Amino acid sequence: MNLITNTQRERMLKNGRLTAQGETIDPRPVVKLFTPDGAATWLLTELDPSQPDIAFGLCDLGMGFPELGYVSLAELASVRGRFGWAVERDLHFRADKPLSAYTADALEAEAIVT
């Protein structure tokens, strides 16, 4: 399974272009990725238009310290959880608030809450 669909890629690139142009945006996460056999979760909002493998969003490795940052989709595709399962896309995730709200909730809960 691809980590993101073509439609998600286009939305994330659009957000990335806005950021690259200096616009301040607070989009809703486009995709939620997770380790089905672990506690890691990523809520991603944009792709860097100059490096379309690099995504930005809220990253939580399950250690109580979620943070905003950049992550390589290729690296995520190579990640395996404790039982050897690959990172998956949450097919049912629909963002209902902007990334800043998910970030505030995650910092309070010490984990991403969706």
Image (cartoon, rainbow, N blue to C red):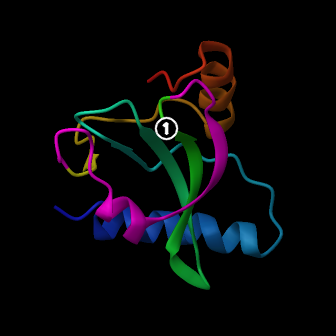
Asked if 77 appears above or below 36 in the picture, the reply is below
Residue that numbered label 1 is attached to = 61
In the depicted view, which residue is nearer to us: 42 or 16?
Answer: 42
* Residue 110: quarter of image: top right
In the depicted view, which residue is nearer to us: 39 or 2?
Answer: 39
* Bounds of the magenta segment: 63-85
Asked if 47 appears above or below 56 in the picture, the reply is below
Q: Residue furthest bottom?
A: 50
Q: Indicate left or right for 21 with 71 as reference.
A: right
In the depicted view, which residue is nearer to us: 64 or 70?
Answer: 64
Q: Residue furthest front?
A: 82
> Which amino acid is tagged 1?
Leu
Q: Indicate left or right for 6 with 96 as reference.
A: left
Q: Is residue 87 magenta?
A: no
Q: Indicate left or right for 20 with 82 as reference.
A: right
Q: Residue furthest top?
A: 109
